[in-house]
Amino acid sequence: MERALRIKSLENSPVNDRQLHVLRMVYDEITMYPSEAWMVLIAIVINRAFKQVKNWFSNERQKQKVGQVVSIRTDTGEKLRLRTQALQLCQEWSDSFFEEVVMIHHFKILRWLRWKETQMAAASASSRLY
């Protein structure tokens, strides 16, 4: 939490594509109600202030009042509200498993954005040749 609270970002700055993809993946595919520990992890991975991540999820829930969730308890007794498809993929959600999922998705987004930049640069270079 301490590390997430040290992240400085402009209060009302919009999220960039990379950050939005990670937030959307968690919201759409895992949970609309991430635990505080999961929001801390997301904040660190996408380099946004914890408060902004927390507010993003709250605002998103207000905008989209749809989505079925299932309540479960972790081994430590923490209550999680997960989407049905997340539970179908894994019955044993933990902080470490969530971290792995977010890190892998974040890595895939970074690779995709770099590929996209390369394609745009190549297209720009080829258009200058003609």
Image: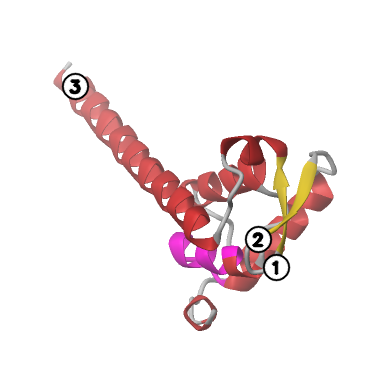
Q: In the rendered structure, which segment of residues is drawn in magenta?
A: 38-49
Q: Is residue 112 above or below residue 71?
A: above
Task: Say which amino acid is labelled 3.
Answer: Ser
Q: Determine the secondary structure under disc 1.
A: loop
- Within the magenta stretch, is there residue 39? yes
Q: Position of residue 114 (x, y in %)?
A: 30, 40
Q: Residue tagged by mark 3?
A: 126
Left or right: residue 10 versus residue 129 is right
Callout 2 touching callout 3 (CB < 8 Å): no
Q: Is residue 11 above or below residue 92?
A: below
Q: Which mark is residue 74?
A: 2
Question: Gap between marks 2 and 3, in whole Å?
Answer: 54 Å
The reply to whether the magenta stretch includes residue 106 is no
Residue at image coords 30%, 37%: 117
Instruction: Locate the N terminus by quadrant.
Output: bottom right
Badge 2, how many Cα within 10 Å: few under 14, some, many 20+?
few
Q: Position of residue 123 (x, y in %)?
A: 26, 24
